[in-house]
Image (spheres, coloured by chain):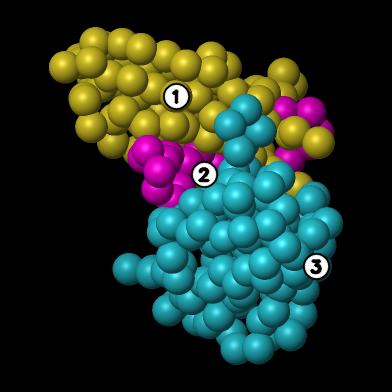
Chain colours: A yellow, B cyan
């Protein structure tokens, strides 16, 4: 069953604008991760936020986590054309730690 | 840098053929994973392995088997390929106890 669900499914913005993607999940988690996938390629890890953290930054990325609402958001500031990609959230699925459940992804298009 | 490689980027096979997808990682990771990715469904875990000769079923193991004879190599086997196995197949690996997964570039398999 799907654990993470991203919203929106697709997002189109202009270069320089901020992009916000949301992820909702159903069960309790230890942490939540965001990954990026360029067209037809593998996924690349962006950032991990633990369940006891509320916000985390990495460069132009800002991730928030609200465990009471079972939701997370990824904000990309000052977007660039090179940020065009699909973005996935992933939640750990229990005791095994490494086993992740991925959402369906948000396709971000940044227009130059 | 961690490198995860997959034997083919594109593969075309016929219904009923036995198909081998190979994945190799060079960072001595204990855990290795096979996912398939389909539009609208995100990534779904097929099988994973946490040690040589060890394997566990993921969410959609039917029609697939795996082999891990050496720590660095994890093979996905389609015993008798069917058209509904046309998909993008992604391999990943990580260290035991770690959450971040490192992905290969993917193999786009078409079964005719």
Residue on which disc 2 sits: A48
Q: Residue at x 79, y 59 (%)?
A: B63
Asked whether the residues under the numbered discs 2 and 3 touch, taking CB atoms below 8 Å apart as contact, a structural biologist would say no
The chain under label 3 reads B
Asked whether the residues under the numbered discs 1 and 2 touch, taking CB atoms below 8 Å apart as contact, a structural biologist would say no
Res A53 visible: no
Crowding at dot 3, Cα within 10 Å, few <14 / some 14-19 / many 20+, comes out as: few
- The quarter of the image holding the N terminus of chain B is bottom left
x then y, percent, for residue A77: 29, 21
Residue A33 falls inside the magenta stretch: yes
Q: Which element carries disc 2, helix, strand or loop?
A: strand
Q: Which element carries disc 1, helix, strand or loop?
A: strand
- Residue extending farthest to the left is A112
Residue on which disc 1 sits: A107
- Please tell me if label 1 and label 3 are on a single chain: no
In the depicted view, which residue is nearer to us: B48 or A23? Answer: B48
The chain under label 1 reads A
Crowding at dot 2, Cα within 10 Å, few <14 / some 14-19 / many 20+, comes out as: many
Q: Residue at x 72, y 28 (%)?
A: A25
Task: Give the numbered dot on residue B56.
Answer: 3
In the figure, B60 relative to B52: above or below? Answer: above
- Please tell me if label 2 and label 3 are on a single chain: no
The answer to whether residue B60 is left or right of residue A33 is right
Q: Which element carries disc 3, helix, strand or loop?
A: strand
Task: Give the numbered dot on residue A68.
Answer: none
Q: CA distance from mark 2 to mark 3?
A: 25 Å
Q: Which residues are magenta?
A: A25-43
x then y, percent, for residue A38: 36, 40
Give the mark nearest the N terminus, 1 or 2. 2
Q: Residue at x 28, y 36 (%)?
A: A59
């Amino acid at each position: 069953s799907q654990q993470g669900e991203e919203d929106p499914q697709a997002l189109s913005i202009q270069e320089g604008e901020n992009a916000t993607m949301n992820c909702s999940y159903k069960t309790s988690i230890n942490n939540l991760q965001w990954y990026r996938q360029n067209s037809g390629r593998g996924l690349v890890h962006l950032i991990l936020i633990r369940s006891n953290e509320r916000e985390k930054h990495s460069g132009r990325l800002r991730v928030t986590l609200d465990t009471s609402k079972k939701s997370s958001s990824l904000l990309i500031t000052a977007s660039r054309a090179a940020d065009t990609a699909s973005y996935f959230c992933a939640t750990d699925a229990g005791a095994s730690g490494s086993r992740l459940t991925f959402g369906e992804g948000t396709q971000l298009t940044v227009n130059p | 840098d961690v490198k995860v490689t997959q034997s083919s980027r594109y593969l075309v096979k016929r219904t009923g053929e036995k198909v081998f997808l190979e994945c190799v990682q060079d960072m001595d990771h204990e855990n290795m994973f096979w996912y398939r990715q389909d539009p609208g469904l995100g990534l779904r875990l097929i099988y994973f392995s946490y040690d040589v000769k060890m394997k566990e079923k993921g969410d959609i193991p039917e029609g697939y088997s795996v082999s891990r004879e050496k720590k660095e190599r994890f093979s996905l086997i389609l015993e008798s390929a069917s058209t509904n196995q046309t998909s993008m197949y992604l391999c990943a690996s990580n260290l035991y106890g770690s959450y971040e997964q490192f992905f290969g570039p993917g193999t786009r398999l078409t079964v005719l």
